[in-house]
Image (cartoon, coloured by chain):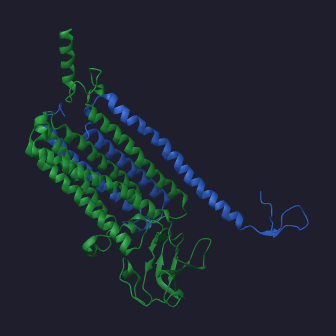
Amino acid sequence: MANTDTALEHHVHEHDHQGEDAWSGAQSPFKVSYGKIMMWYFLLSDAFTFAGFLITYGALRFSSPTWPVPDFVFATDPFGISDYFGQAPLIFVTFMSFLLIISSVTMVRGVQEGHRENKNGVLIWMILTIFGGLGFLSCQAWEWTNLIGKENMSLTRNTFGTHTAEGYYLDHEGKKSLETFREGESFLIHRHAPGGHSAEHGAAAHGAQHEYKPGDQAGYLMDEKGFVHRKFVYTAGAKKGVTQTEQFGPAAFGALFFFITGFHGFHVFSGVVFLTIIALNVASGVYVARKNGYEMVEKIGLYWHFVDLVWVFVFLVFYLL
Amino acid sequence: MSHLSYEESKKRVRYGLVLLAVVTGVEVLISLFGKGHMISSVHGNIIVIATCGLLIAVLSLYKAYFIVYEFMHMKYEVKGLAMSVVLPMLLLVWAVIAFFQEGNAWKSRRDEIQRRNALPATPAKQGSLLPPHTYQMDWKG
């Protein structure tokens, strides 16, 4: 009897660092520890949550006659960087993606150093990973601030509309202006104080700055909240020649954007918190005593890669398509 | 992990960084091309948009595969574990097809309601069994 027990214990030790009591079947299923396999299944369930959100975005986008063009909506960046290049669509968010990819790579290096039981190596790479995550969160904070504060997007209001045919804008006095647009081009409805000027996103492209009066004017309509809906005429399509007023885009866009990128951002934030806790444990030498190749670092690594993985699809759905 | 030496796995990580960065860059370029930012005449061409969208989606799936199999070490796990995580994901293929179809159906139904609302209608003959304020539409099939 004693011999059999030793043999079983030996077998478990080969595959499972957690010890004999982790899986009482004497052999760990799939030859991984309990913690790692449960992390995998948590990530699987989380993937379904995110997939549900992103598929909802797709379904609502398919159901709307128009949808804001992402490379118009997300053409902004901080510190006036785009002023040097003219327009810079998607550049800022590409930078954010690179940040997350790099932090994923530093995480892999941390896990590798863990397998070598190199405490300082793990710590350095984990700290770099944390900085990557914090950088990403800062970028997202700027992006949200810009959308909410400057472009007046909210959960129920989408200030980005889209033209369904080509045409031209009317000028301040309601006469034909030189400014034309093409089918499928998006516009931003600006908010002005009555009688005030504007220096918001895209305002420079609209040429001369004017004072705006509330109400239905010849060249624009200013609603009670101060949004200036410019007037335009289509030169093609079913509504050819009819003077129309800019309408808000599909309201679902704002709600979906804030909810999905917010949910992802929350994952990044919790990832940073857990990374910090585990980095502190690494520094204090808790995992040296465990002698299991820094398995905890490996588990938080799985989570961190997953956050990067989800961003691949958020990036695809919101920004690229 | 255990299959590779330390130096080899370090090289593998550097390769991964370059690969992911390049694929992301290519995706952005394809996206901007598809939206007509590079060649103006491309703008609004539905075939170009669809082809570029499909290309980007495939590249994103490849990135996802690389992250899971290389960075998350799925390649070096037992096949059963990999399958128990990857196979349930196939349900999403159904979900994508079904819900995009559903979204399209909402759109065509709304268009249909608008079309029928625009049809001419006359007040129904009074004295019939119909309640007051009933309108009769011309039958359009």
In this picture, residue A312 sits left or right of residue A215: left
Using the rendered view, name the quadrant where residue B115 is placed. bottom right
Quadrant location of the N terminus of chain B in the rendered image: top left
The x, y position of residue A120, in whole percent, is 8, 45
The residue depicted at 71 percent of the width and 63 percent of the height is B116
* Residue situated furthest top in the rendering: A1
The residue depicted at 28 percent of the width and 55 percent of the height is A269
Q: Nearer the viewer, residue A189 or A292?
A: A292
The x, y position of residue A193, in whole percent, is 42, 86
The x, y position of residue B22, in whole percent, is 26, 53
Palette colour of chain A:
green
Using the rendered view, name the quadrant where residue A15 is placed. top left
Palette colour of chain B:
blue
In this picture, residue A119 sits left or right of residue B61: left
> Is B97 above or below relative to A4?
below
* Residue situated furthest right in the rendering: B127
The residue depicted at 13 percent of the width and 44 percent of the height is A282
> Is A27 above or below relative to A47?
above
